[in-house]
Image: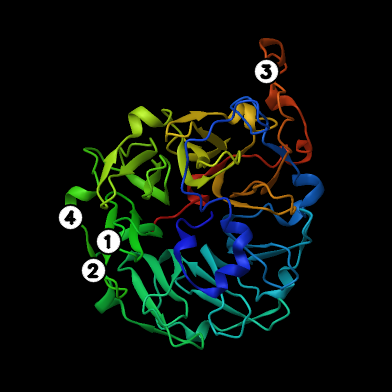
Amino acid sequence: MTRSAASSISFALLALVAGVLTFAGATGSTGSAQSSGVADDTTMLFRDATVKHLPTSELTGYSMDAAVADVNGDGALDVVIANEFKPNILLLGDGTGHFRDASERIPSHDRDSEDVAVADFDGDGYLDIVVVTEDDTVNEFYLNDGSGHFRDAGDRWPVEGTSNAVIVVDLDDNGFPDLLVGNNGQNRALINDSTGRFSDETASRLPSRDDVTQDLELGDVDGDGDLDLIVGNEDVNRLLLNDGRGRFRDADPRALPILDVPEETREADFGDVDGDGDLDLIFANVRLFVEDARRQNRLLLNDGSGRFRDATAARIPIDDQSSLDADFVDLDLDGDLDIVTSNVLFDGESIKSAPYGILLNDGGGRFSDATRFALPKIITGRGLDSEAADFDSDGRPDLFLCSRGTVDRLLLSVPPPLPDTIAVDTLTTDSLSRDTMSRDSASSDSMLQDTTLTDTLSTD
């Protein structure tokens, strides 16, 4: 997924992945989409380019998360995929939206890879890779040799843990990227010595908590100029405020509305959805391991001081799927942030494929489901993650979709309609059933099979 509020991080390294951040860093507006060449809620936004643009035979494993960056310095965006209990994957892009498998460039291990982050950790000007793992507790660290080939530097990690999340941030404000790691147990703060060697400063930088953390996201929620932290957990989510020195404390309990039923959050994202200049928040919720958890995703609006109110009922559609990811992205380039969701269906025993979702913003922070118009057909998968970036260099956001156990997908944006044209979707065209149209995806349909719970997302 694109990491929320990443445009606030002042590393020079982020300039190398600017193509990823362009579409997720908008602050929102009240712009409209009336006959101006901007997409409205009946305009197709994407085409499925999976079969022709991806090495699909390499992408039917257990993709858990992806990171997008130019790792080989050729000016084109690449994709690094955390692959569960199989070797991780590196796809090199050519700048036109085509990718080739270059996984031989990274060390090959069969680990329980869960989340991935990219940054120049050793200060040599080249982007390195970190992958956190869950069940086998051995996190992975790959250093770039400058040509997009990587060597194992896992011995530079000072801790082990049952890890599900990792995010890059300069905690000590020395210009070098540090790491926050989300665990089943105590989360960790790892400080970089500027050469890519880390020390554990958890005790002085994070509250002592024994949570089951699935996601970490950063954003300045209270407008004081530093990055605060949302911790997405199984059961109770937490908001931690930064003291300006990279040390976090629990926010006032009233700052983050808590449900009266369990909440199992897999991902969170920050973005200004209502155009008022502060960061709002979405939780992607599931019911997988927490009994009676409410699957409904939640939208929380910030009052500007870091206090949130629950605006879910009035502003986003009701859903009963389990969303493992939700990202704010300006999909239709109208100046406000829309939402992409990655979903699964779970019947208590098996994980089944579900449609990815597109929710369009009306400019005021109210969202409508535009999935059937924005996508060329119903795009399904066991959705774990989505990453928005301009893969084909046309100035518009594309989507890479991670699907665990089914083929990953690439959706490329389509040009907007010409001014004063009207997109038509009538009862007649609906009756053709968009989800039966092939549109470059028929060869991957056979991979959309169900899986048992014993062969899926673990919480240990």
- The residue under label 1 is which amino acid type? Leu
Task: Count residues near mark 2 (Cα–Cα under 10 Å), then give few for <14, some for 14-19, many for 20+.
Answer: some
x then y, percent, for residue 200: 35, 82
| Mark-to-mark CA distance, 4 and 3 | 48 Å
Task: State left or right for residue 444 relative to residue 119.
Answer: right
The residue nearer to you, when weighing 334 against 427, is: 334
- The residue under label 2 is which amino acid type? Pro
x then y, percent, for residue 116: 53, 65
Q: Secondary structure at mark 1?
A: strand
- Asked if the residues shown at circle 2 and circle 1 are in contact, with their CB atoms under 8 angstroms apart, the answer is yes
Q: Which mark is residue 425?
A: 3
For marks 1 and 4, the one nearer the N-term is: 1
Q: Which residue is mark 2?
A: 207
Count of marks, rendered view: 4
Q: Which residue is mark 4?
A: 252
| Mark-to-mark CA distance, 3 and 1 | 46 Å
x then y, percent, for residue 331: 59, 41
Q: Which residue is mark 1?
A: 240
